[in-house]
Structure formats: structure tokens, C-alpha cells
Amino acid sequence: MKFRVKLIPVRMDRSSAIMSQEDAEELGVLVGDRVKLVFGKKSVIADVQIATGLIERGEIGICRTITDYLEIEDGGEVELYPVSKPASVEYIRKKMDGHKLTKEEIFAIIKDIVNNALNEIELSAFVLSDYFHGMDFDEIEWTTRAMIDTGETLTFERGIVVDKHSIGGVPGNKISLLIVPIIAASGLLIPKTASRAITSASGTADTMEVLANVSLSVDEIKEITERVGGVIAWGGATNIAPADDKIIRVEYPLSIDPKPQLLASVMAKKGAIGAKHVVIDIPVGAGSKVPTVEKGRELANDFVELGRRLGLNVTCVLTYGGQPVGRTVGPALEAWEALKALENAKPPRSLVEKALGVAGTLLEMAGITVNGIEHARKILESGKALEKFREIVEAQGGDPNIKSDDVPIGDKTYQFTSPIDGAIAHVDNKRIVKVARAAGAPKDKGAGIMLHKKGGQHVKVGDPLFTIYAEKEWKLDRAVELAMREPPVVVSGMVLEKYPSYRYI
Amino acid sequence: MKFRVKLIPVRMDRSSAIMSQEDAEELGVLVGDRVKLVFGKKSVIADVQIATGLIERGEIGICRTITDYLEIEDGGEVELYPVSKPASVEYIRKKMDGHKLTKEEIFAIIKDIVNNALNEIELSAFVLSDYFHGMDFDEIEWTTRAMIDTGETLTFERGIVVDKHSIGGVPGNKISLLIVPIIAASGLLIPKTASRAITSASGTADTMEVLANVSLSVDEIKEITERVGGVIAWGGATNIAPADDKIIRVEYPLSIDPKPQLLASVMAKKGAIGAKHVVIDIPVGAGSKVPTVEKGRELANDFVELGRRLGLNVTCVLTYGGQPVGRTVGPALEAWEALKALENAKPPRSLVEKALGVAGTLLEMAGITVNGIEHARKILESGKALEKFREIVEAQGGDPNIKSDDVPIGDKTYQFTSPIDGAIAHVDNKRIVKVARAAGAPKDKGAGIMLHKKGGQHVKVGDPLFTIYAEKEWKLDRAVELAMREPPVVVSGMVLEKYPSYRYI
């Protein structure tokens, strides 16, 4: 059937063809069915949507993404006919019923995810099937390979490529800003792609962006890595393993992260950049993604096995994730603290030792040394790591002379003090993140939290517990109010709430 | 934050607020998060969507459904802030993890489904959780009650209300057009709400619409039922158990119908119209929804138990669903055949006996007689059922003098004949439906299939097997071509395909 184009002046990812109820019946299609729009030699597949009232019979509402692609104007005429679902929908049905998928079926699904050929219902069904039924190792391996093959990849002419990944969930985990320069200074290559915060207060990409540009293309990542040994770039600016971002869009609203997807997504990124040795940091503890050591070991085994299948040498380190790493949470505060560590200016041990532990493991795996931690410590304490970090910052378009105290931090602050004598009983990861986000992180780079005391330390009445930083007064107020209602740092014996009316004592 | 309204000139069911990436970051929201739009004293919750290029900073793209509701113009200013997910999303998460829901949690979910407060991902997660984990009887009962309570209900001052429902899947099942007048003629009340075809060639509402208006309000259904004893209306025109339609929108793209949803959806409609006695027709056989007698019995037990909990007297009848009921498939052809049966003009036994079996069961349940089938047969053969049917047609605005031969059938036809001597080995339900839909059914009322032979009957070379009817030549061609490629009626010994090139012999 022929339709007259009615341009809907927005751009959307998923392609919709909006039509009248009558035309949908005439075509024999329902909402969510697919139609093919043909104009000249170009065609595009779109989902049927029904709009009442404003789309007339014979009209098809399509957004600018489609009209631009078809090179058709508002009022132009397209040919339109129903097409069947892609075969991948059948494979998703198969997985829903608990059957094992073949390599070809998994490749078809991942390819259709990347090409936006699946709608949200179908994509949800795929992710939820993995959540409910899991995947065996063959399926996980195929998913990983499919995610690599449907995106860009990196190859280096010379050098040994290594990488690290931290499973999310623990706030303040800015270790990559120490590890990358230590590794690069040792002569290995580390083209680190990092993520931005989704639900956290700062992703490594957000933190690095305080000091340099992180939106680098795959070519730029390659060039800088070959020149200075390392890079800290935002993975989302590249087309590396692009299926991951689309899958996250479904996982996020449901707050799920099925293990097969977690494994595949992490390892696809490592495989795509050609890493030979990889350390996976698995923070374990209340409020992190992995609550117990047993679960941590299980996940570690899975990573090692998947690495073996893909030809990657993987070591997992279980780390303490029960409270933030270091004392700061929020992009600028974390960049400030990482610089302090590189400057050897009394940095917190929880940050430095963790970074050295991971970097040292990589150095040992790559055969640089048999005592990785001490080797890494030397690079850090000699100032070579700071020097290398400044080279990296400069290569990414930042100021190579940056000092920790130059980092601009939010100038609106509020300090919480201890209401009683006692010891810090609990620093709550989730509440820390909630308060930091209320203060404006990660969008407002200067917003966040600095912890003056951490778990187990003794305090007296009036001692500072933590300070909230913000760039805007109203966001500070919002964060302070939240922190009073839901205290992120608890002193043992402290009254938390009073009923009927509650307030922070 | 304040935003300037940019009107997107369509109406959509789900409310979206389309904004720029920058504004989404400023607000700290991601695609799929909720925001509240406030204008004057009115407010509405919408899903965040990001559109690049055409929505500028400070602008919010919303469709006409929202602007009309808020009574705001293009260019007007709304206040907008993030809100958290409804509590029902937490309950869906709980069900995803296999936990039993409480009554209050189920009511909250169903209410949010009816109010369009859940997005497609969340709704998919709910339906898929039911698919994967099932529901226990408490949950099914609460779902049913929630579906009843979130919609309109019917109460009658006098009389005994009965109803029937056929589980879908078997084509040509026009028995309601016989049962409703038989029951109404017996003095019982039967306010039958029926569905339109979703994937079939004709729903009962499509078939009845050939003869009368089926878009009746709840008030009209009540008035006509009280006056003439029965009605055959389209349920979709009412607001009875409206959650069902929304749930079907997710089930349809995945071709699933989880048992808890099936049970709740059928029984909610029966409960909402105040039925006291209900017969559920469960067609069993290859190509129907219930493949084996064992599965049919299981489902029957579930319906009876759910009825007991709701205070409805339920009897299930297992019927043969391995091939079409009667000889016709498609709205007008089915109306024609039902009228033939009411006129006692040599109707097919598979149609009449099935209708009498179901009607007879209802008569016995309501205490009208101890020999239901014979009582029903008398009403049919005496012409009282035809007389009552004409009253119903007239009450629904149709022509009370309608005769079977007046029903307009598609005038483009193509007859398939047997290529060999033999017996009918197989009449394929799914292929029959596919061909009838290709011919234009259910949209083109006159389109469909008439079977000249059914399973087991003997044929000679050249004997007519079936005829395709269509209203449009191109649809007839399409259907004929499909029927040649995928023969819906198979004579034992017949060559079906030839390779490398295939054709119907």
C-alpha cells in the first residue's frame, strides 16, 4: 500500500511507523508488528504504532531519523507492506522455554540487538530469559564473541596489551587513575575504556573527564596508547561491543544484571581491545554487587573459564567492597584524590594498596617482575606514575601541569559531625551514592562527598564525619536533607530516627 | 526545572517526555525514568525519552494526549521534576525472583497496568515472570479480582446470568451465535462479550458484526440483555476487565499466553458481568491452544477451582479442536453458516452438536432441565432460537429479517480440487487461518475459506476440497499462492512439494 509521509519532527532510536487504526486493519497488522517502508532504492523496517485523531487514513507518521535515511520529504509517498518478525525472535522464544541456543542463533540475536531490529518487549524477553534460565558456558562464550564481532576492535602492532575491570557497586573506586599510569610507565600497553555513571555517583570516565577529554574514537585510543602507553577513554564514545549499551537499557529499569550478560559484557570489551592479560577486581561486601566471598569466588571462576575459552589470561582479585574506596565520592573529588595519590601526598591506604595490588598482579602476569606490588610501588613512589599520568592527560587534550589542588571542587559545602562519642559502625555504600547524586554528581563534576572517618574509627562528639560538596545551593540543600533522613555514616549508639517526627540528632 | 512545551502532533497511549541529552543529565534522569509534568493544578507522569537534534535545551516534547490533558499550548511552560518508579515495579521485581505476591501487591500492579503507569519493559517483566514462575491459586484469584475491580461491572435486578467461553485456537468456532439465542430463549440471561480476532481469521465479535452492531456500552448490554435475554457484544468497546487488553499487547509479540493470565482474564470477564453459571469450552488437538487431553483436564481443573474461589459455578467441556468447527472460516462465511444452523438448513453436525452440548450444559447447571442437549435441540429445531436470534440482532441495530442467503460473501473465489483419489488426512488449523487472513479476513468481512471435505472423508481426483473467498482480487491471488505453497487440506498420498522447484500438483 502507498502512504503519504507525515514527518514527526524528532529523532528516535527505534523506528516507528505511526498509522491510523483503519489502515492497520487494512494491512492486517497490530501494534508491534513490523512493516517495511520503501522509497526508491532504500528501505527501512519499522514497528507499527497506532495514533488516534491526528494521523489520517493514508498517512504514515515517521520520525526524522527515518525520513533522513530514506531521503524523503514530508508529504512524500512511500510504499509500505507487512514483514514478518526477524528469526531472532524465534530464538528468543526458544531461550524463554529454557532451551540451549546455538552459536548461529546467538549471533543473530546480538546482531539484531545492535541494529535496533528488536523492540523493547523482545529485548526484555531475551534479557529476562537469561535472568531466569541462565546460560551455559558455550552460550556465554558465543554471546561474548558475538558482542566483539558486532563492534569495532583494536589491534596493536607491537607491545603486550593488558587491562583491568572493576565490577561496579563500590563508590569511590578511582583506582584506574593510578593503575593505568603505573602500567603504562612499566612499558606495557593499557588502552582502558571506562564507563560513565549509570546509577553511581561517578564512573571512571566521569572522573577522568575532570582532567581531560574522554570522548575518543577507536583510532585515537590506538594512537595515544601506542605513543604514551595508556589511555582512559569513555567506552560509550566508541563502537566497541555496542550490544552492551542496548542491553543495559533494559536491565536498568528492572535493576537486574544477569550473570551471563555481566560476564559477556566485561569480557567482550577486553577481547575487543586485544588484551592478553586481564585482572578483574571483584569488590565483595554489603552494599556492593557481590554480597559474599562465596559468590565472589563463583564469579571469579566464571571469569577465568570464559577467559580461557577466549584465549585471554584472566586473574580475579576479591577486594573489600563494604565501604567506599578512599575517602572521596564524586567526579572532581575523586580526581583530586587520585592526583594526591600520584603526588604521594598522604593518600588513603585503601586506595593506594588496592591500586598497587591490581597493578602488581598485571605486572606479574605479563612477566615484568615476580614481585608485582613492590614493583608497582616503586613506579608510584618514584614519581614516574605521576609523570606518565600527565603525559596521558596531555595526550587526551588536558593540562599536563595539573596539580591536585588545582582541581575545582564544589564551593557549597555542609559538614556533618558526630552526635556522640563512639566508633563508626557503618558507612552505607548506597546511601553515600544517593546523597552524592542528590548533591549533583555525576553531572555537576564538583559535587560529592568526602568522608573524614571510615568504618571502625573512633570519634568524639563534634568530630567531623563527612562533608557534602555541591555546585548549586538547592542541590546542597536537597542532599543535606536526604543525609539527615537517611544517614550514610552511622556511629554506633547513635539515635537514627525518632517517631512520630524524625530528625538527625 | 521549567521547560517550554514542544507539541508532537500525535496521540499515544503511553506518555513520553522527550528531552535533550543535556537536560536529562541536568535532571539526573535516564531513558525510561519517570518525570512529573506540572501545569497549573494538573500534573501527569511521563517516561523520559531522549531525542537528538530537534529538541533543544529547555524544551520538552510531549504528544497531544498530554497537552490536551494539561490544557497547555505549544510553547507553554511546564514545571518538570523526576519522580521515583511506582511501588508496583518493586513488586514485579519480587515476582521475577520467584516470590509469592500479596493481594495488595497484585492489586497495585493491575491498577498501574490499567492506568498506563508501567512501561513496556516493566509490563513484559511481569508477564514473563508469570510465564517462567507461574502463580499459585491465591495469586490467580487476586489477579482475577483485581482485573474485575479495575473495570466496569454489570448487575442485573432479576434473572439467572450464565455465560460461556471458548479457549481460542480452533478456527470456525461460531457456536456463540447458536448458544446465545438458545439460552436467551430458555429464559436465562446471557450478556456475552466476545473478542475480535487478534491472530485468528474471525473472532465472535467480527462474525456478529456482519449482522449487527457489536460496539455496545455496558449500559446497552444490560438494557438489551434484560429486554431480550441475550446479547453478543464486542468486549473491547466496554471497560470490562481493561487490564486484559494491555497485557495482551505484551503477550502477542512473544506469542505467549501464560496460564495464570489466561485463567484470570477469562474469569475476570465472567465475574464482571455477574455470571452465576459458566461453561468453558476447551478445544483439544493438534493446532489448537491445548494440544493434549491431559493438558485440557489440567486446565479444566484450574478453571473449576478458580470459579469456586470466586463463587462462580464452572463446568469445563473438552471438545475436539484438531480441525475447524463447521465448514466455514471468516466473518461473513461464519455468520452465513450460523444462520443456516439456526434455520435448520442442513448445517454441519460438528457445529450444531457442539453448540447444543455447551448450551445443554448451561441449561442443566441453571436447573432448567435434566436433559440439556435435548432441551436445547428442541429450542433450536422449533425455530425459537432463530426467532430469538433475530430479536437480538434487531436490538443490536441489525436487520431482524436477515436470512442466511442474504449474507454478502466475497465474490472473488478460487476452488482447490483433489489431485488424487484418497482420504482427507489432515486439515491444518494454522494454515487455514493463514490463508483466510491472506484473503483479507477479518478486515474484509466477506473473505475466508469454505471446506468441502473434512478429515477422514474420501475424495476422488477433481473433487472440490475447499474454496477461498475474497473481496479483492490481489488478496485472492495472495491467498491462492500461499495455499499452493502451504496446503491447508492434505489428501493422504498427495505430493506436497517438489524440489528443487515446488508447486502444488
Image (tube, coloured by chain):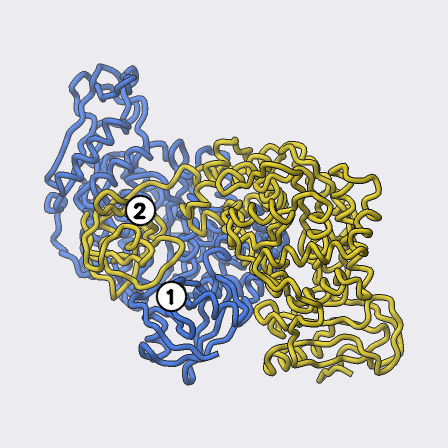
Chain colours: A yellow, B blue
Q: Give percent across and percent down for residue A24.
A: 26, 52
Residue B387 shows up from this direction: no
Question: Residue shown at 23%/51% (left/top)?
Answer: B208
- Residue B502 pos. (x, y %): 26, 20
> Residue at image x 44%, y 69%?
B46
On the same chain: label 1 and label 2? no
User: Residue B88 in the image: x percent, y percent?
Assistant: 55, 63
Picture quadrant where residue A273 is located = top right
Query: To which chain does the residue with label 2 belong?
Result: A
Residue A36 relative to residue A132: left or right: left
* SS class, disc 2: strand
Residue lying at 21% horizontally and 61% vertically, measured from the top left: A56
Q: Pointer 1: what residue?
A: B154
Q: Are marks 1 and 2 in contact (CB under 8 Å)?
A: no
Residue type at mark 1 is Leu
- Taking depth in this image into account, of B360 and A347 the one nearest to the observer is A347
Provide the residue designation for mark 2.
Answer: A44
Residue A498 appears in the picture as rendered: yes
Left or right, B194 with respect to B478, comes to: right
Q: What amino acid type should be assigned to the residue bearing mark 2?
A: Val
Secondary structure under the numbered disc 1 in the rendered image = loop
**Viewer-proximal residue among B190 and A277:** A277
Left or right of B381, for residue A276: right
Q: Is residue A472 left or right of residue B290?
A: right
Image quadrant containing the C terminus of chain B: top left
